[in-house]
Each structure stands twice: as structure tokens, then as C-alpha cells.
Amino acid sequence: MIAPATLVELRDAVLSAPRVIAVGARTKPRLSDVDAVAITTTALAGITEYDPGEFTITALAGTPVAELVAVLAGRGQHLPFDPLLVEAGSTIGGVVAADTGGPGRFRHGGVRDFILGVGFVDGAGRWLRLGGKVVKNAAGFDVPKFLVGSLGRFAVIGTVTFKVFPRPERRLTLRLPFTPRALADLARSRYPIDALNLPPGHDDMLVRLAGPAAALDALARGIGGREEDDGLWREIVETPWGFRTDIVAAEIAAHRAAHVSGGGSVAWSLVAPPRGLTLRGSAPLWIGDRPRFAIEGAVKEALDPVGRFPTLDDWTGAPARPAPPPPPSPAAGA
Amino acid sequence: MSSPPALGRLGALLPPARLLTRPAELAAYESDGLTAFETRPLAVAVPETRDEVIALVRACRAEGIPFVARGSGTSLCGGSLPVAGGVVIALNRLSRILRIDPDERIAVVEPGVVNTRVSLAAAPHGLYYAPDPSSQSICTIGGNVAFNSGGAHCLKHGMTANHVLGIEAVLASGEVVRFGGAGRDRLGPDWCGLFTGHEGLFGIALEITLQLLPRPEAYATVLAGYATLERAGDAVAAVIAGGLLPGAIEVMDSLAIEAARAAVDADYPPGCAAVLIVEIEGPREVVAIERERLDAILATSAPVAVRAARDDAERAAIWKGRKSAFSAVGRLSPDFIVQDGVVPRQRLGEALRRIAALADEAGLRVANVFHAGDGNLHPLILFDGRVAGALSQAEALAGRILRMCVEMGGSITGEHGVGVEKREFLPAMFNADEIDCLKRLRAAFDPLGIANPGKMFPGGEAPALGHVGLHPLERAGVVSRE
């Protein structure tokens, strides 16, 4: 285990072993369970830039999410996508690499929708900063978005810049009977819904409203249901979910067992989904077929020419690597 | 008429009527929204199906012929400028909305679908497509995806990339891929995110899945006039500091106001050096409360006048003035170029002062219309292209403004892209290693360098200077630059 405390040390750490993988607080241990020297980012921590008036914050990868959340709250702001496992110690680099957006991603989007820039070390040991530090930027390819969910297989993240939003004045949670129709109707209703979840079992659905304090009671009366303690969202965020999946609304009726959902799409589950990623335990890293393209190998080569990082198919217990799809032959379109 | 030998097997892929090679047919494709440049392509291919697009790209690869994908040609950075000796693949006929799913809140469209058609098709379900570039009545979703287009509502809703859930594309390598899908969640790296904003350098999108949002129930659109641009800038800062998250915050300076007033008879308060437009959206109960807060903030910002839209017609009138400002500036000057730099929002006042000083120094007039909420400037540099050297003077000023944006911690482009226009400025933002990384990514998708070559990266071949003046559609008020 190597524990760099500076970005220069991070670069040296990447070059110090033939195969390395970045880890944070290991709150999703299966994702980094691979035969490689671990580079822990826990000493690479701290908020480096925060300007509330700009709606942007930059932090080193090992910064605990809890620190970001607290500092932002102090200025009336937040990361609207509800990063998971805050109290468990997850780091901001881990949130990006594992794409752990929680219930709040329903309204304004997930990790990918708030990342503005990254600083990272590529497989050749180059320190690179792509994206930007302002809320709007269209220069260069969007590598910051690509690294969301990339599981440390393409680069080691050193710094992250996020867009942040003003924190709503108040939140109000309602519990209502679940039917797929009622859920779909609410999801495109006029109400300021910022989370719409199905707790395991799916007899009920949870609706979180957010906005000006004085408006919410009247809005809640329009929706009906029973008011719940806002603390239940903390439980959802801190649940050690076993799996990540990408089930969409049309499929949820068939997966009522133990999923939590964002307005119909299911991201986190306690039971193995038909397809997904394992976050903890010894199940295969990938469940079912994962997206697989010839371009993946080419992009991997561009960012990690010597294979310093494992691939998406490398994990402890992985079967012999499946053959990548062959690149199309020039004659294919003839 | 048989196709030129240089087209090789491309000639066999489409009927002659859809493979244009006569100079008169090519003329319409020689330029895009960056009207200062033009290049005649070898041919324009007009496919009607995804399979034809795939076959064209693969044939270009086999023959080593460069290709440039094109929608409505509204790019402001020369993103769809043809390549000499290359083929333009015009995607306008792939214009079907394949599916609207109100329960999943998605639209699945072909690349040639015009932006506003998505919201029109979604409207019966109470949904809309949020990204609203000013050219939205004509620009296509394929182009929006290629350049990660913005619009007036990015502060709250983000750019095109934030609304693209899935992309089926033919890559320049010949591979056909399906990135993402119908859901908001993905497994593994965000390929859709990487593809969106590729500026045509990775391949061609064949089918795009877009997220739709519930249409806001109510809007409050407020226009405030100020005696100085600085006061308008301070008002923007106050609105942000007040904890509001408006859908849009826009500012126009006196020259832009003058132009808008002349063009659309915009009823802006007289005697103002700057106009601020703030729009709040949401459920009526929320809008009512936030409107009171906004009024209170604006009341302390020393406005000359504050006007609120009382109905949809008045809201539309306020936006018509704003969105027509660019083409309206065309009435003040035979030519203009528009820049798209971004500065940290709190330094907008300083940026505008410096732009004014740079303009004075250069002896040029600059009108400013900008997305103040996200620090995205749109200085319009006025010049007369008939005067020798005037364009290069204007470009030199534009370059100084872009460098200033980067120095201030911003970006050379907020929403227009780099394209041909700003490729020499990419090194102002990224160092040699970083540009090298971007080039390696490009080579991964396009090993032969045939997809939209000469864009984004510095040092490409120089396109020919073209005609001057407004784009014909712009003159007709159909499109505007933003």
C-alpha cells in the first residue's frame, strides 16, 4: 500500500509498481479487489478551492465527502446528487470512480452532471488536467465525465472540481402507495420533487419535495400521503448496497425484491440484479453482460499505454479474459 | 452524371441525386454559422438511413476520404466547415423522432431532428427538452450532441451532455456502438459523456436518447434596466448570493439593447446602459415566493426600472428581444464575430471593463450579450469586412479577449466549441501533455484522422476566407447566433 500525500507523490506512486489501483476508504471494496498495488488517497485530502459565489468547489481525491458536505452546508450549498456512504468515510475520488450518486440525482442528475474538471495521472505517469473550473466549459473532450464510473481502470484521479447548487430551504418527505402508474405520473408532475424512491418491497414510494419552506406544505397537500421523517434518506444514503445496476422504470415491476430507485430507474440494490456491478462480497465484479466495445481497448491504450492499471475485466477471481470484439475490417461496409 | 473517380466506392452507395458534386449544388454547404470561412468539399452525401451513414463512414475509411458530418450548419466555430477533398455527410434527412416514452421521460431521435421539434413532440405529455440554443428553431440534435450546445438555461439545467442518456454511433474506426441507454444510470465509464462534445472528431451519432423534463408550471420573467453595466453585474451577484437558482440570468449592454430595440421593437426601459433578465421557473407556489425574493433583491440593486412579464406573450417578447439581439447587431455593422469565452461569474464586471478597454485600444465596437448566470460572455465584435484588414483586426481582438478569459480562470468556449475558429487557442487552456492526451483519444476513435480533420487542434490547414456579412437565414431572422 502506498499513501501519497502530494500530487507529485501520487505521480511517483503510479510509476512505482507495474500494476496499481487507486483506493479511497474502500467503502465499495469489490470495485478495487484486484491483483495490483493499492495507492490509497487518504493522505491526499483537502479542499483546495471553494468560492460559493461561483458555485464551484475543488478538492483532492482523498477528501472525505463528509468534509465537502459540511463545508458546503456552512455556506448554504450542497452536492444535489446525494453522494452515498458519507458517514462511512467515502472519498470524493471514490464517488467519481464508482459513480455513487444517491436519491437526489433524480432532479438535477448524478455525479456526471456535476463534475466540471479532473486532475489525474495517466498510465504513463503524466499529470493532466482536463475539463475546467468554471460552471460552463466546452473546450476539449469531456474526460471528466468519462472517468465517472471508470473504476480506476483508466487513470488515477488526483483532484476533482464540482458544480454545486444552493441548498433548498426545506425538504419534506411523503410516503404514498406505490403503483407504476402513480410513480410515472409523479415523475412528470408539476411538483418540485428531488427524490422519488421505492424502498425494498415496493409497497410504498417515498417522495421528497424541496424548495422554499413556505410553499412545501401546500404542495404536499396536493400530493397527499403521509409525512415521514427526513432522516430516512440518511439511511438510504448510508446503506451498504451490495450492487449497482441500471434497471429502468419499465423493468421495476419484475425487480421488487430489494431495490432503491430514482424515479423509476434503479441504481442500488441489496440483492443481485440481473445485470450490474458488485460493490461488496465475493460475487463476480460484473453480473450479466457489461457494455463492451472495441473502442474501449483503444481508449484504454490512449490513457494507459503500458497497462499500469487493471482493465475492467480484471478482478480477483475473474475468469480468463474474454476476447474483445475485433475492430471492424475496412471492407465491412463494402 | 457519374461520380468523380476520387470518390471511389462512395459513388456506388447512394443514387446520384443524393451524392451532390456539381459546384452549384455544393455552394450551399461551403460555409456554416462561422460565415467568415468557406471551403468547397469534393461532394455532399445525403443519406436517408442509418445504414447508409454507416456505409458512407466505412467507405470513407476504406478510401481514406475525410468526412464532415453536418446538420443545419449553424455552428459558430466552423465546426461543420467542409474539408477540401473531403465529403460532407448531410444528416438532415435522418429526421425521425423514433419514440417518446412519457413514463421513462425520454425521446429517441435521429440526428437530423431539429431541436424544437423534440419539445413540441413531448408537449402533450407535459414534458420538454431543456437545452435551448438560440438557433434551436433550426439546429439539429446531432449537431447539439457533437458540440455539447448550451443555451440560456444552462445554469440550472446544464448543457446538452446533461440531457443525453444514450447514443448509437458509427465511429470513425468503423465500429458501431451503443453508449448508454434509456436509463439515468450506467455501469462503467460514461461513454456518452465522452462522446458528447467530440466536435465531429469521433464519428457520427445515428440515434440519440434524450432525457425529457416536466415542463415548468409557471415562470416569472423579470427585466431590470441599469444605468451602468457594473450595476447589472452587481445585481447578478446579489441574485446568486440570495440563494436563488433561476432558470436563466441574462445581460445585454447598451449597444445590444439599441440593436434589439431597432430590430424587434423591444420594449426595454429607456436610458439604460444594461438590461438584466432573470427567469424563475417551477410550481406556481414556489415561483410566487421566489418572485418576492427576487423583487426584494432587485429593489436594492439601484435599477432604473423593473418590469415583469404579466403573461406568456410578454415573456415571449422579453425573450424575443434577447434572442434576436445578435442578428439585430447586424443592423449596426456589416459584419461581426461573436466570441464565447467564460469567466468566473464574480469577475464579470472586471471582464467587461477589460473588454471595453481592449476594444478601445483596437478601435473597434463591441456589443455584449451574455449568459451572466454562468459567466458565459458573448462579445460581438463589429467590423466591416469590405475594409482590407478589418477581419484580421477583429480576430486579433477576439484572441485577446479569449486569452483574458483563460487568464481570469475561465474557458475559451462555454457552448460553441473550439472548431476551426478557436483551435489556435486550445494551448491557452491546456498544456502540451494535455493536448497530446486529447489527440491520443481522438486517434483511438479515428486512427486515420478522417473525421472532421482540421478542427479543435492547433496547426490545421487554413480554410479560405469567404464572403462577409450575415448568414442569409440570420438576415431573415430565422436563426441567431448565441
Image (tube, coloured by chain):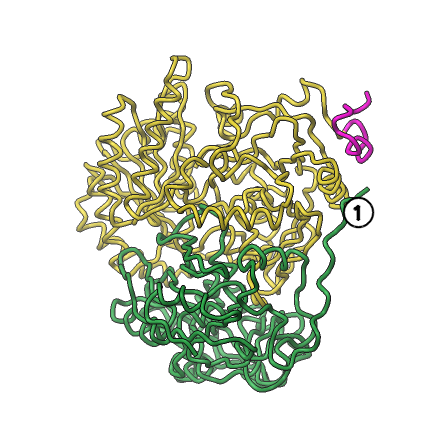
Chain colours: A green, B yellow
Q: Is residue B61 above or below residue B183?
A: above
Residue B8 on the magenta segment? yes
Residue ID for mark 1: A332
Q: Residue at x 49, y 51 (%)?
A: B437
Identify which amino acid the numbered label 1 is placed on.
Answer: Ala
Q: Is residue A279 left or right of residue B337?
A: right
Q: Which residues are magenta?
A: B1-17
Q: Is residue A123 left or right of residue B427?
A: right
Q: Residue at x 25, y 30 (%)?
A: B358
Q: Residue at x 31, y 69 (%)?
A: A169
Residues B219 and B381: in front is: B381
| Residue B357 visible in image | yes
Q: Position of residue B316 (x, y in %)?
A: 43, 41
Q: Position of residue B173 (x, y in %)?
A: 68, 47
Q: Is residue B387 left or right of residue B241?
A: right
Q: Secondary structure at mark 1?
A: helix
Which quarter of the image is occupied by the N terminus of chain A? bottom left
Residue A60 on the magenta segment? no
